[in-house]
Image: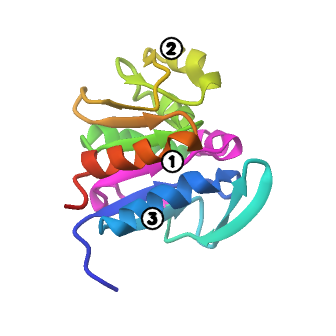
Amino acid sequence: MAEYLKRIAFMVADEGIEQIELTSPWQAVLDAPAEPRLLGPQLGTVRGFNHLDPADSFPVDIAIEDAAPADYAGLVLPGGVANADKLRTNPHAVRFVKEFAAAGKPIAAICHAPWLLVEADVVRGKTLTSYPSLATDIRNAGAHWTDEEVFVCPGDGWDLITSRTPKDLDAFNAAILKVFSLGA
């Protein structure tokens, strides 16, 4: 395996992951080049979905409960309604996000993934975007919601990158590469 400058964590649940929101940023990170690592609820495989249709399986590199934020330069949270809902009820995922933000490391979340950020109570005072149905949850968590293709919010010691839907992936990926300081 090639040596990489940075390792980027991608955190997902066991199923319900919006596949393109995993694979597109993953490829952008690989092309940077950097090393993406898949964190899941346990070792084995996780299932991607194309909206509601089951799609491909992906091998988990490390269980979330065994992962340490210190080992990663950035965190990507793909969306998918079921994926985000399962992650926000996983105490290891919530802990990881809290520790990642407390360490001042950048987090990128797309579509429904900000639900996990709300659960981890790390969005207070931030501005972010998401799938529109999360706007009230985000506001109730003390953040400002905006309807933009991608929004990068510095402040509170760490950068937050958010996008609304798969239609925004080009802008989301470009922001990830810039904020995570990947590539040329």
Label 3 element class: helix
Give neighbour class at mark 2: few <14, some 14-19, many 20+ (Cα, 10 Å): some
Write the residue at 67% across / 69% down.
Answer: 57
Q: Disc 3 or 1, which lies upstream in sequence? A: 3
Amino acid marked by disc 1: Ala
Label 1 element class: helix
Residue 96 visible (yes or no): no
CA gap, disc 1 and disc 2 = 22 Å
Say which quadrant the C terminus sits in. bottom left
Q: Disc 1 or 2, which lies upstream in sequence? A: 1
Residue furthest to the left in view is 184
Residue sitting nearer the eye, 110 or 68? 110
Residue 181 vertical position relative to residue 117 in the rendered view, above or below: below
Mark 1 in CB contact with mark 2 (< 8 angstroms): no
CA gap, disc 3 and disc 1 = 23 Å
Query: In this figure, which residue is indicated by the disc labeled 3?
Result: 27
Query: In this figure, which residue is indicated by the disc labeled 1?
Result: 93
Give the residues drawn in magenta, as a range.
Answer: 64-90
Query: In this figure, which residue is indicated by the disc labeled 2?
Result: 139
Residue 166, by quadrant, is top right
Residue 120: give x, y in percent of width and height: 47, 33
